[in-house]
Amino acid sequence: MRLPWRRLLAVFALTTVMAVAPTAVASASAGSAPTSGWNNYSCRPSAQHPRPVVLVHGTFANGTDNWLVFAPYLVARGYCVFSFDYGMLPGENLIGGLGPIADSAQQLSDFTDRVLSATHAAKVDIVGHSQGGMMPRYYLKFLGGAAKVNALVALAPDNHGTTLDGLTALLPYFPGAADFLQADLPGLADQVAGSDFQRTLNAGGDTVPGVHYTVISTIYDEVVTPYTTQALSGPNVRNVVLQNLCPVDVSEHVAIGLTDRIAFHEAANALDPAHATPTTCLSAFS
């Protein structure tokens, strides 16, 4: 019997989100997200925050659930904030990040143009989680995004692929597994360390001129492994390890993007470095 893998993935995604942010998910189900202040196309950036922020979700996620906490966090600080869905496979409308990453980057390009047109801004800032922190680099490098983006802030991004705690090393021992990934879940196959996509993305250097990069990682990441591969090299790069800011922060891969206000505070600093304040354990209450 063929397993209904799409339904299984949807259940996995919902279970993950509900495990770390049950209250937020409940409020979204009640319809509060559309009125929470983000994805407001009449928003005009202020002099203090002149660039709209585009939020890019991770794998097995979507543009609402991934940002139920962080989007209102930014809106309350005076930002125009926008999110979208990308990488949805045919027949899916709940979970994304599973389509070919190059195609997803084109979706980001199209969405960014829409945001710039609506807000009349010259550039955007991008904040992404997991794949959403890595995929925009393809947009910046190959699709003209560098001219439209001031900063990329990445929470637990798989910038150089992932071994999934070594699980990808097992693929050669399961005939057809790699082909299945590429054919049915290309967004996952592209994220495997050493994949053709990863080699293309990182050839010639990690960064492009003119864009400011911030990478925020956690030592407890169990998805993008080893966590040290998340760091970028190049000019205008700042790599931050969450536990260097707050040693008792135990957020792992999912929580750093969904609920961790310490990570959020550091991300806000990266969006407005001129008014940055120190990120400490107390930032969880600010």
Image (cartoon, rainbow, N blue to C red):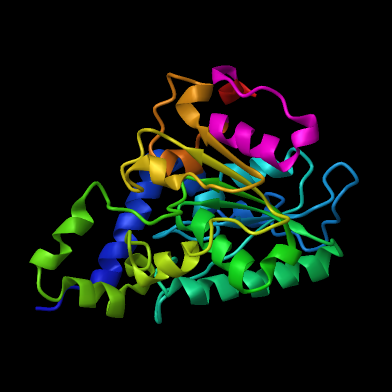
Q: Majority secondary structure of the magenta segment? A: helix
Residue 267 x %, y %: 62, 39
**Left or right: residue 251 compared with residue 56:** left
Instruction: Tell me the magenta residue range.
Output: 262-282
Against 18, residue 102 (above or below) is below
Q: In the rendered view of the protein, which quadrant contains the N terminus?
A: bottom left
Residue drawn at (53%, 34%) of the image: 240
Q: Is 3 placed left or right of 138 in the picture?
A: left
Drawn side of residue 126 relative to residue 192, left or right: right
Image position, residue 35 (x, y; %)? 69, 53
As drawn, the residue found furthest toward the right would be 47
> Can residue 133 be found in the magenta stretch?
no
Which residue corresponds to the image point at 58% horizontal and 18% vertical from the top-left? 282
Residue 278 position within the rendered picture, expressed as x and y whole percent measured from the top left? 66, 22
Residue 240 makes an appearance in the image: yes
Q: Residue at x 62, y 24 (%)?
A: 279
